[in-house]
Amino acid sequence: MSTPLSGPGSATQAPGRGPGGSRPPRSRATRDHAPITLTGVAGKVLLLGLTAGIAVWAAFPLIDGEKWAGLALLAATTAALFYLYLTRRHIPAKYLVPGTLFLIAFQVFPVLYTASTAFTNFGDGHRGGKDEAIVAIQTSSVTQVPGSAEYALSIATKGDPATGPLVFLVTDPTTGTVSAGDTGGLRQLDAADVTVAPGGKVTAADGYTVLNFGQASARSKEITDLVVPTAGGALRSSGLSRAYEGKAVRAYEAGCDCVRDTETGQTWTADEELGAFVAADGERLAQGWKVNVGLSNFTRVLTDKNISGPFLGTLIWNIAFAVASTGGTFLLGMLIALVLHSPRMRGTHLYRVLLVLPYAMPSFAMLLAWRDMFNADFGLINNLLGLDVDWFGQPWTARFAVILVQLWLGYPYMFLVATGALQAIPRELTEATSVDGASPWQSFRAVTLPLLLVALSPLLISSFAYNFNNFNAIYLTTEGAPFPADNPTNGATDLLITYTYRLAFGGQGAQFGFAAAISLFIFAIVAVVSAVSFRRTRKQEEVYS
Amino acid sequence: MTTLTGAARTGDAAGPPAVNRNVAGRRRNRWFAQVGWRHLVAVLGVLFSLFPIVFVLSAALNPLGTLSTTELVPTDGVSLGNFGGLFERTAFGRWFLNSLLIAGVASFASVFLSALAAYAFSRMRFRGRRVGLLALLLIQMFPQFLAIVAIYLIFGTITDLWPAIGFNTPWGLLLLYMGGALGVNTWLMKGFFDTLPRELDESATMDGASHAQVFFRIMLPLVAPILAVTGLLAFIGTINEFLMANVFLTSSDSKTLAVGMYGLLQGNERNNNFGIFAAGTLLTAIPTVLVFQLLQRYIVSGLTAGAVKG
């Protein structure tokens, strides 16, 4: 982990010695003479001990799960950490590694993972591999056919009755043999180990806890979903005390690489590009598998009419929202800062305390409060103004409302920073313009505003970037509403980020691949805007020295 | 209009005593042109700032506790019943503690981690320094929550392997927040360290101090006030974080304030729960508003210093 930060041979310099880069000849000797303090050693032992403890704790589940790659990564990271903090070399890395570890694990890696997901069809119905999809299709098509064998059923588990994995204990009515079945299949139990009640129901079995009726009915959904594959089909429950061996109506045939319905004769052929079984008429089976779909998630945004139209609208509104929020808060904040910035003005401290209250209030709660102030039936806004407007019901009133809320939340911040910037402008400058006969407006335009903009433009850029992805502002107020009647996934006030969130986690079924593609679009837009604006300000360059 | 006369009276008291009625009238006009209109605008601004807060206050004190009966000023009497209801009917205390724990640890740890990195970037010269700084600049352009889909999938695996740091635990969310720490604060902190004179740590090194002693004994105490403000802003930011917390925390006991109080206003209970929601808002606001007003001056300087951060 430390290599990208400091290659071998680098970082051998004591802090603060000499001008940039050149290595003082005797730095090695200096370091060797650096004192070894008791607190230093104690801290080091404590932290490294903690690291070792965490590593051991984390290793056991990896061993259980046989995740050898993960285990190797863990061991390598731990070893590298020990090396880094026990050696006297690589001093900068000692300071950089702790934060970098978190950065790599929880920011860089997720971003890369997003990028790779964007090229797949990962989502509901496309989660696992093809084999898993085939098993899912076959078992879900198991139905009771005339002549299906019926068994007496008991529900049991090897673990806790409330949470342990379920096992079916079934008794064959003709032979009387008892078998235990789970998703792995059916295996016969020794007759000596089980107690069978008259009627065939198993009441006790060695190694199993038989669930009573109450425990079983609490988990009835899991029981219904449990399918035990057998030679001729699969075993499913019918109620809590009967099971039947049904036949899989749909079966996979390797010859044609297709799924055939044995009752209707219909076939669905595997389509490796879509990751689904598709019938001749285009009908798809719900269970598909995850495949690489190339750029189709990206081209879908541009070519699919149902997506591209609303997407363009969302993009334009997104930019407009960010510009209006940033510009509006800046103008209002600057106006009030200018108004209070006068030597003859009294009570500015009190005004300031009251004006910045919105900034200090918890914003998530105030967004929710604003949402209810715009409530059409009994909201404060309609009551006070005597209106009867369904604010979030029409596109333009909803857009106006969310921008107004952003104005309220954001202008105290702009007021604070504009006040700070105004105080930094020497009064002589404006006094000089008034001596030269300039009107207050002229002096503002020619002197104050340019100086303010120089000081605040980096803040305006970051405010724009923040508002461009201001998830809370939309999700906690309109939730993207109003939605057009024919498109429940993309509303009039949706930002790209709330749209992405709905694609991935909304009620319409998860489309992780497509959502990741939209995330990359947002990445690209934010990066371009930031790159252009940083190039313009060039402020960052000074800080490198 | 009442506000105007109120403001005018303040101005009169401040101005020199009028000699006669005529002069007084002219003075009053001039006073309004120079100062009075400023008070007018400021009062309008204060009204805009305050009215939603007054509404929340009124809703919290409303004995009926519903949205439909809440007015801007409480008319049906005042009661503290909503505060009691908040603790009886919801796990508000638990949410509050969760939020304090997560935001407290996350802001402290992230400030500390980025101070460590900033010290290296500010005071040491090593290969990859410039690349590292540029990489951080790039990374901070990509907000962590844009990768929320990937984070959700990754933590699905983590929950299977280590349930103790998976979904529905504060620790998982905490780890996630720390991932964003370096990108957000390092540039800001490096700016602070750069303002400290190099002679300080050079002389300490001459006196035989190790790099760790220079950092902990000399640099950290000098930037402590600004670190506190940065930490406070990070704290408030974390308290308000909703997107990732909402994906992470679904069980009632593990929720943070943002997720829990959002849930209060979902579904059929939205109208009835508004009173206790407002009470919760006020309780959440009290600590932040107090600290904010106390540290206001430092916050302004912290914000403008952060201007470089972008």
Image (cartoon, coloured by chain):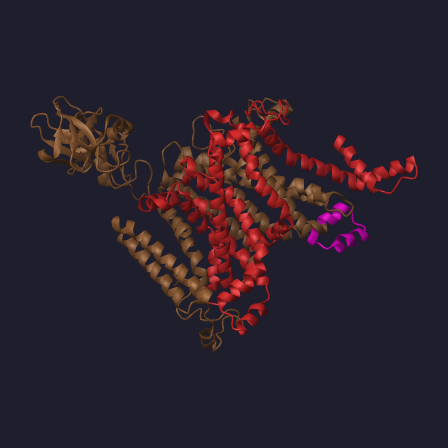
Chain colours: A brown, B red
Up the image or down, B242 lies above or below B106; here it is above
Identify the residue at horizontal 13%, vertical 32% (top origin).
A194
Relative side of A545 to A267, left or right:
right
Dominant secondary structure (helix, strand or loop) of the stretch shown in magenta = helix
Identify the residue at horizontal 87%, vertical 38% (top origin).
B26
Q: Could you tell me residue A218's position as x and y percent?
A: 29, 28
Number of callouts in the render? Answer: 0
Q: Could you tell me residue A196's position as x and y percent?
A: 13, 28
Up the image or down, B83 lies above or below B152; here it is above
**Residue closest to the eye, A82 or A45:** A45
Q: Could you tell me residue A335's position as x and y percent?
A: 69, 42
Q: Is residue B60 magenta?
A: no
**Residue closest to the eye, B254 or A326:** B254
Relative side of A140 to A43, left or right:
left
| Segment tinted magenta in the rendering | A423-445
**Residue closest to the eye, A119 or A90:** A90
